Image (cartoon, rainbow, N blue to C red):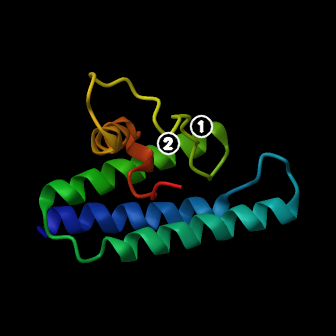
């Protein structure tokens, strides 16, 4: 990891914790605020630790883009949780004769950038 990339990642990490410290739930309830703050901190720690060993610059860039997208969406909608995607299990159109593997590849490609780190449920 280059020095500039490391600096950008650490800056992003501190930005997430700063947001968590000042986060206010949209409902105004103190319990909701604390729950959402804990979620933001837990999610950040989990994802940053999960990606700690990345060395590929493109993979690091994708992770940074995902983090920035999640921050912007969370701040805009005042909701720290990832937005759901609504794709039925086999609902993507394919050419005749294609199998499940193609459906899985298409679903992976259709996943928004802010959900790249989440597994299929």
**Label pair 2/1, CB-CB below 8 angstroms:** yes
Q: Residues within 10 Å of mark 1 (few under 14, many from 20)?
A: few
**Element at badge 1?**
helix
Residue 76, numbered circle: 1
Q: Which mark is residue 53?
A: none
In the figure, is residue 76 to the left or right of 70? Answer: right
Q: Is residue 30 depicted above or below 101 in this figure? A: below
Instruction: Identify the residue at image location x=49%, y=40%.
Output: 89
Q: CA distance from mark 2 to mark 1?
A: 6 Å
Tell me the SS state at disc 2: helix
Q: Is residue 2 left or right of residue 97?
A: left
Q: Which residue is mark 2?
A: 72
Q: Residue 60: x and y, percent?
A: 23, 60
**Between 17 and 119, which is closer to the camera in this rendering?**
119
Percent from the top left, x then y, of residue 50?
Answer: 36, 74
Q: Nearer the viewer, residue 52 or 37?
A: 52
């Amino acid at each position: 990891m280059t020095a500039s990339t490391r600096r950008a990642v650490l800056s992003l990490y501190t930005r997430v914790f700063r947001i968590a410290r000042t986060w206010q739930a949209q409902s105004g309830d103190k319990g909701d605020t604390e729950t959402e703050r804990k979620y933001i901190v837990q999610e950040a720690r989990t994802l940053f630790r999960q990606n700690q060993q990345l060395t590929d610059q493109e993979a690091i860039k994708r992770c940074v883009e995902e983090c920035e997208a999640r921050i912007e969406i969370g701040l805009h909608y005042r909701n720290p949780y990832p937005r759901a995607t609504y794709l039925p299990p086999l609902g993507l159109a394919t050419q005749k004769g294609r199998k499940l593997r193609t459906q899985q590849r298409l679903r992976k490609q259709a996943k928004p950038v802010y959900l790249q780190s989440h597994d299929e449920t």
